[in-house]
Image (cartoon, rainbow, N blue to C red):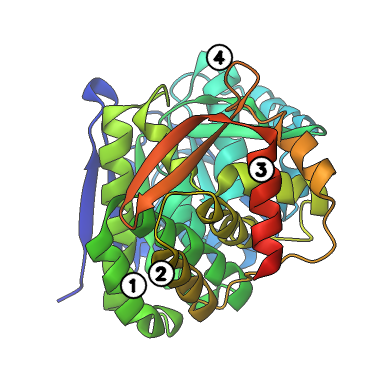
Amino acid sequence: MKNKSVIKVNLFDRSYPIEISSSLIDEFNFSELISGNDCLIVTNEIVAPIYLDALINNIKTNNIETLILEDGESTKTEKTWSYIIGKLVDMRANRDTTILALGGGVIGDIAGFAAATYMRGLPFIQIPTSLLAQVDSSVGGKTGINHAKGKNLIGSFYQPIAVVSDIDVLKTLPDREYKCGLAEIIKYGAIYDSDFFVWLEGNISLLLKRDDDALIYAISRSCEIKADIVSQDELETGKRAILNFGHTFAHAIENHIGYGNIFHGEAVAIGMIMASKISSIMQADQQRLMNLIIKSGLPHKLEGFDKNKMLEIMLLDKKIKNKKIRLVLLSELGEAYIEDNIQNDHIMDAFEKFHQD
């Protein structure tokens, strides 16, 4: 019998399911979710040749339009967003038109932002094709695009009507991209569930082999944690901020090194190590976090970065409060807290300690 998991994100009238299993692109009943006669599939040049035809064959609507974008973070721009809006105008889309985001985090973010902004909101379905997107970016309703001065500075909270995560797509994912998703999975154990962190320490080899049962459990537990947090704090006014563990550093790293030169999950892995250096967590647990990151095949060092430039970028982060950097730190593995009063010298201290390892 096929292993399957369904998790619900509880947001009252905007609640939605996350379905996790194999063969979903071929077999999931999308017609139940598509209310109108039109839909637009937004995907990219890497995913389209492998999965687009199968998805089209599975969807039963009168009019299916497709838009194939270039791959990569550099696509997540105002120009591309405008291109999607133009396509919607050309196909005379209305509020019954459904957008399907078939791709990784970039596709989900930009297609979701188009759905949020065209005619003030179209229904959209997330069909994430990377591990990182399946465990993180497809869940919770964050959509947006990048600006030259920072990542995700333009965006909105806009929930999908469903997330459909087919684990079969992970079999074709390049190793480097696959490992990026492991960074986000590690994050969930580190901030919220010490038992899950221990499970990851014991099962990371199975995840690296892309074992189906291990994948479904790890993806499901990650989504359960995120769904629980989002259900309590949809708009990130409080607890949801703990999901940003490692991300304030990571976004600065990506901006500084250059989008595409370092992948998001790689930057998150380094960012978690940096954040742990100024957390109240015991040194032994700092080492456990670093060891798990290393065992996952993720980077734990960053050569040649300008500490002053990194700090300057971090001071532009959208999570700044009263012109001070806010960081998610760890009190212990499985327990995170938000520190609102981070001084600039604390950040420089994190950089120094990171370099000493």
Check if mark 1's residue and mark 4's residue have beta carbons within 8 Å: no
Amino acid type indicated by mark 2: Ala
- Structural crowding at the residue carrying mark 4, measured as other residues with C-alpha within 10 Å and reported as few (<14), some (14–19) or many (≥20): few
Counting residues from the start of the chain, the first of labels 1 and 2 encountered is 1
Which residue is rendered at x = 71% and y = 44% of the image?
A: 252
Camera-side mark, 1 or 2: 2
Counting residues from the start of the chain, the first of labels 1 and 3 encountered is 1
Residue sitting farthest toward the left: 1
Question: Which of the 4 quarters of the picture holds residue 294?
Answer: bottom right
SS type, badge 3: helix
User: Which dot marks residue 200?
Assistant: 1
Q: Is residue 68 visible?
A: no
In front here: 311 or 115?
311
Residue wearing tag 3:
347
Q: Is residue 237 left or right of residue 33?
A: right
Amino acid type indicated by mark 1: Leu
From the top left corner, tell me how far across and down residue 14 is, in percent.
Answer: 29, 25
Check if mark 1's residue and mark 3's residue have beta carbons within 8 Å: no
Marks 1 and 4, how far apart in space? 43 Å
- Structural crowding at the residue carrying mark 3, measured as other residues with C-alpha within 10 Å and reported as few (<14), some (14–19) or many (≥20): many
Q: Quadrant of the C terminus?
A: bottom right
Marks 3 and 4, how far apart in space? 42 Å
Q: Is residue 100 above or below residue 129?
A: above
From the top left corner, tell me how far across and down residue 113 is, in percent.
Answer: 58, 29
Camera-side mark, 1 or 3: 3
- Structural crowding at the residue carrying mark 2, measured as other residues with C-alpha within 10 Å and reported as few (<14), some (14–19) or many (≥20): few
Amino acid type indicated by mark 4: Met
Question: Which of the 4 quarters of the picture holds residue 89?
Answer: top right
User: Which dot marks residue 119?
Assistant: 4
Amino acid type indicated by mark 3: Ile
Which residue is rendered at x = 46% and y = 26% of the image?
A: 158
Marks 2 and 4, how far apart in space? 52 Å
